[in-house]
Image (cartoon, grey):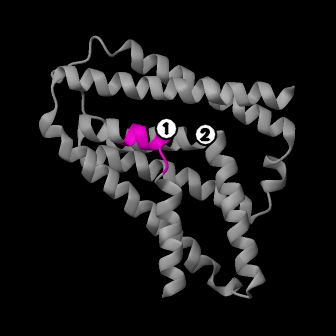
């Protein structure tokens, strides 16, 4: 039970750092409520599962090839810049009355896309889960691999719920100005990540 609890804490720790997914969850939760925020987090978690599966199957060797890393940086930069510009441009015309409810499936797709194209997330999971696999094998606990992996995602899901509950509880204070400010900050955050990943991409080819 101690090991399971440790891996749940690992999942929470991996999800807690501020990033594009957490920012998107906060925005969607404030604008659309608990389910919209949670759906973004679950979508991102599906992308995490995909990358963990690739690590388990040994594809991390491909991801660590320099030219592949450069592509991931530039592609991630393009997507984040596009989403950031789109978010910033709609800020002025956004009001509570103009908001439309986003279906959970759309939130899943949005969260999945954000995590899928996030180069830091990709390499982070490759490094972390690769280390977890090595540790489990080293200690002869290969038969517990599935249990420990599920424990990690229990932690991730718990954090998604915390963000969803926190953001949805802030809806009562929502005004048009606050809504526009949140959307602007979220858009600028995505632009910042896009510029950062583009910078890393340039460095990787120099």
| Res. 192 image quadrant | top right
Q: Position of residue 98 (x, y in %)?
A: 20, 20
Q: Are marks 1 and 2 in contact (CB under 8 Å)?
A: yes
Closer to the chain start, of discs 1 and 2, is 1
- Give the residue displayed 72% in from the left and 36% down from the top: 72
Q: Tell me if 67 is positioned left or right of 52 in this view.
A: right
Q: Is residue 1 above or below residue 121?
A: below
- Secondary structure under tag 1 reads helix
User: In what element is the residue under mark 2?
Assistant: loop
Measuring 70% from the left and 25% from the top, which residue is drawn there?
199
Q: Is 20 a magenta residue?
A: yes
Q: Is residue 38 above or below residue 13?
A: above
- Report the disc number at residue 20: 1
State the image coordinates of residue 159 (x, y, percent, origin top left). 39, 58
- What residue did someone put label 2 on? 118
Say few, some or many: other residues with alpha carbon within 10 Å of mark 1 (under 14 / 14 to 19 / 20 or more). many
- The image position of residue 44, as x and y in percent, is 50, 48
Q: Is residue 138 above or below residue 150?
A: below
Q: Is residue 98 visible?
A: no
Q: Residues within 10 Å of mark 2 (few under 14, many from 20)?
A: many
């Amino acid at each position: 039970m101690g090991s399971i609890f440790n891996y749940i804490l690992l999942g929470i720790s991996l999800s807690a750092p501020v990033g594009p997914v957490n920012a998107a969850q906060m925005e969607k939760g404030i604008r659309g409520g608990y389910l919209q925020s949670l759906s973004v987090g679950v979508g991102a978690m599906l992308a995490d599962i995909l990358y963990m599966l690739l690590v388990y199957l040994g594809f991390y060797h491909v991801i660590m090839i320099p030219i592949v890393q450069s592509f991931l940086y530039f592609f991630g930069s393009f997507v984040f810049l596009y989403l950031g510009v789109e978010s910033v441009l709609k800020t002025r015309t956004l009001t509570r009355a103009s908001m439309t409810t986003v279906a959970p499936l759309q939130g899943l797709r949005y969260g999945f896309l954000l995590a899928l194209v996030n180069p830091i997330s990709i390499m982070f999971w490759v490094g972390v889960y690769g280390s977890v696999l090595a540790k489990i094998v080293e200690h002869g606990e290969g038969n517990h691999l599935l249990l420990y992996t599920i424990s990690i995602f229990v932690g991730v899901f718990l954090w998604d719920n915390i963000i969803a509950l926190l953001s949805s509880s802030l809806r009562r204070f929502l005004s048009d100005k606050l809504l526009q400010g949140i959307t602007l900050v979220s858009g600028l955050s995505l632009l910042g990540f896009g510029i950062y990943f583009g910078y890393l991409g340039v460095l990787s080819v120099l």
